Amino acid sequence: MISSSENRVSYDGDGLAKEFAYQFKILEKSDIKVMLVKPDGSTQILSKDYYVDAEKSVVVYPGYAPGAEIPESERPPVLPTGWRLVLYREVPVTQLSKLLEQWPFNIIEDGLDKLTIICQQLKDGLMRSLHIDESHASDVDVTVPWQAGKSFRINDDGKSIVLTEDPARVLPLAQSALEAAQAQAQAAAEYARNADKCMRAAILAQQTTEQYKENAAELARAAATSEQNADEYQQAANAYKKAAAESEKAAQNYMSAAGQYWQDAQAAASVAQTNAQKAVETAAGIQDIADEVAKVHEYLDAAQLAAGNAAASEANALNFAQAAKKMAATASEMSEKATAQATNAEASAQLAQAQAQEANKFAANAADSAASSAQSKADAESAADTATQKAAEIDTLIENAFLNTMGLSVTEGKICITYDKEA
């Protein structure tokens, strides 16, 4: 008589128990199968290290038949905590009864054989179908829900089968979502790289701004120096122009004086020649007058002195003329040099003004870059402050939630126990 449908029993290990009872009927000790379930869910059907005591309806693990014991060092440990032992019945689907070859025994044997054949067919079909491993509980509902266009899966609690979306439909959507996520991840990575480049560019711009500031200051100083030099060059040019004008005026005066000296020398020479002619004529006319001889000699001496003076005056006039020509040439050269230096001074002044304008442009650009860098830095600091504030708020929320869970609260900086007055 079989009054129970129980076919399996499971035990959790505690590191102490060695005997595990079963309530279902078996015909042979080999009808009992022992399965070891490890903490990771993997299973092992044992072929040794256990003993079936049919009289007490228990399985001893680790256990051995009387006289077949092995040394303690070779035995497995008592079923540890976290491990499970599953005992289930598995009877061979055979019919070994042989009855008499006469009625009604032959009919009974044929009926038994037919039932065995049917059981074998059912077992074959079950072995080629989905089924639950013996290690799982018997309260699992294996009814498969059915709906058009849907699939099914094992529920999260492991106790039933529930409907789910058809993978053939969901997979393309998931693939598209994955590709979109990957594209977004790549875009985010690109944004991160661009942000890093922008940060580096901002740092470089700040450094360049500082360099532009230094260059602008240097150019401003150079412009100021150039402007000062231009003023000095202009003053020097004006001085050279003035000196050239004075030199030219002095040369004209020297030329005028030389012309006057030359005229005076010619006049003196003419007078001397006239006096000499007169003296000769006078000497020829009064050779017979003895008392006039001394006068004649005096006239001759005066004529000779006048002629000498005229020659000296002519030489001095020539020297003055040559000196005047040299001074005029020197004055002309000095005037040309002064003009060239004035031209150079004007060009230097124009270059200094251009450099000053370029320096002002650099300074303006540097100010703009500095303002942009300062704004970027201010934005980054503001974002960091916001993130820090949010983190502090989250920490406060987590702390309050933890204290509320523990029945605690914070009052005036002290942790207090919250209790129910009615209780």
Image: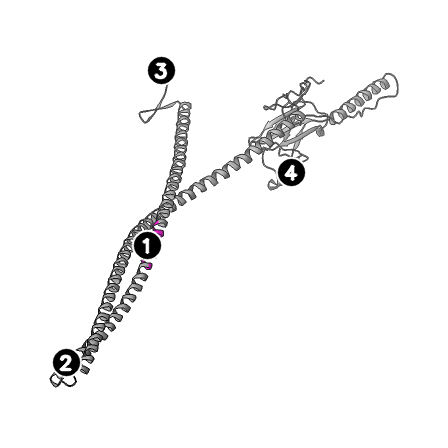
The three-letter amino acid code for the residue at tag 3 is Lys
C-alpha separation, residue under disc 2 versus residue under disc 1 = 63 Å
Residue indicated by mark 2: 298
Q: Secondary structure at mark 4?
A: loop
Find out whether the residues at labels 4 and 3 contact each other: C-beta distance under 8 Å: no
Q: Closer to the camera: disc 2 or disc 1?
A: 2
The type of residue carrying mark 1 is Ala
Rendered position, 186 above or below 307: above
Instruction: State how far apart marks 4 and 3 are (Cα).
Output: 66 Å
Question: Mark 4 sits on what residue?
Answer: 69
Determine if residue 18 is in view: no
Pick out the residue farthest to the right: 102
* Residue 286, horizontal then vertical, whole percent: 16, 83
Label 3, label 1: how far apart the Cα atoms are: 104 Å
Q: Which mark is residue 21?
A: none
Q: Quadrant of the N terminus?
A: top right
Query: Residue 342, which numbered label?
Result: 1
372 or 414: nearer the viewer: 372
Give the left or right position of residue 24, taking residue 184 as reference.
Answer: right
Q: Amino acid at mark 2?
A: Glu
Q: Which residue is mark 3?
A: 421
Query: Which range of residues does the magenta coloring cover?
Result: 336-349
